[in-house]
Amino acid sequence: MKKVILTGDRPTGKLHLGHYIGSLKNRVRLQNTYDQFVMIADVQALTDNAENPEKVRDNILEVAMGYLMAGIDPKKTTIFVQSLVPQIAELTVFFLNLVTVARLQKNPTVKEEMKQKGFKNSVPAGFFMYPVSQAADILSMKADLVPAGADQVPMVEQANEIGQKFNRLYRPTFSKVGTLVGDVPRLPGTDGKNKMSKSLGNCVYLSDSPAEIKKKVMSMYTDPGHVRITDPGKVKGNIVFVYLDAFDPDKREVAKLKNQYQKGGLGDVELKKRLIRVLENLIGPMRKKREALLKDKKSLQKILRAGTEKARARAAETMKEVRKAMKIDYKI
């Protein structure tokens, strides 16, 4: 039997280059050799969007389109909606008894996102318990591997802690889950200061127009000391080179450009023009796919319906094992 992958994204907006390089690229590659489940995590999106459910609802199909645009094949990958698999919520409740508040407070991903969102002491309980919900996502599908960005590694680690504790308390049920981080563990945003994030407004989206790509690239931070073309420039921390390293397929040419930039004689505008071409070559075909998908939303809904039915059946089998292990498989 093929090993299983579980991964996913919150439907809070369009998918961007950070998603692509951090996880989507690996998902496309791995769908040929794994039984892959990709989840649209609407329940988790509601943990900090409870007062704006329309935002989550409106982005379900947007995220599904992003998957197909990036090359995920619904004939090879199961795409499903989290809230339509109630067994995940059931498993979350059981898992809540296996983790302490103190442990959740130490989760670096939760701490960082709480800081970004300015929650402090007003953090919603659902958001605080996010790692437990994510453990239920992963383990309900009996996943062996999670392709994810570097910021999600602590979440998978906590899922393993919960799964192993369940095994000790009840009976061996869950295997240890591995994490596969993308080629670029954390892609910075166009501002060069933070990771690419919808909430920070520093994203290049997989659906951006040529004009939008150009505007965003031309505004990128380079080296403030590189005033004239003849001036030697710094490569380290130069966001344009970070993106060229991530997305330019001609690595030898990028190495030559770095050498020339450091010596002097290469302008920032020339570098940015190259990056614009590179990104347009990547995003252009995705944009065309999106235009076609927008004309056939019924097919998207059919894909989600079929995928959700398959995910629900798999989760139901897991819950039979869980209830039997916990001795709550009552025959009443």
Image: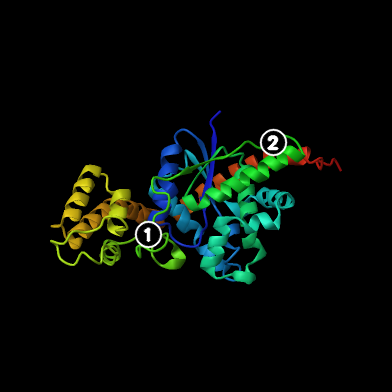
Q: Which of disc 1 and disc 2 is earlier in sequence?
A: 2
Q: Which amino acid type is marked by label 1?
A: Tyr
**Residue 198 rendering spot, x and y as whole percentages:** 44, 64
Label of residue 173 in the image = 2
Q: Tell me if mark 2 has few (under 14), some (14-19) or many (20+) residues whose alpha carbon lies within 10 angstroms of its own.
A: some
- 69 relative to 155 in the view: left or right: left
In the picture of the structure, the residue carrying the numbered disc 1 is 205
Q: Amino acid at mark 2?
A: Thr
On screen, residue 261 versus residue 310, left or right, reads left
Label 2 with label 1: CB-CB less than 8 Å: no
Is residue 46 among what the camera can see? Answer: yes
Q: Secondary structure at mark 1?
A: loop
Task: Classify mark 1: residues with Cα within 10 Å, few (<14), some (14-19) or many (20+).
Answer: many
Q: Position of residue 118 (x, y in %)?
A: 55, 71
Residue that appears at 68% across and 38% down: 317
> In the picture, which quadrant includes the N terminus?
top right
Quarter of the picture holding the C terminus: top right
Residue at x 39% of width, y 55% of height: 187
Residue at the extreme top of the image, as rendered? 1
Note whether 307 is above or below 204 in the view shown: above
Asked whether 252 or 32 is in front, the reply is 252
Residue furthest to the right in view is: 332
Drawn side of residue 15 relative to residue 121, left or right: left
Which label number is shown at residue 235? Answer: none
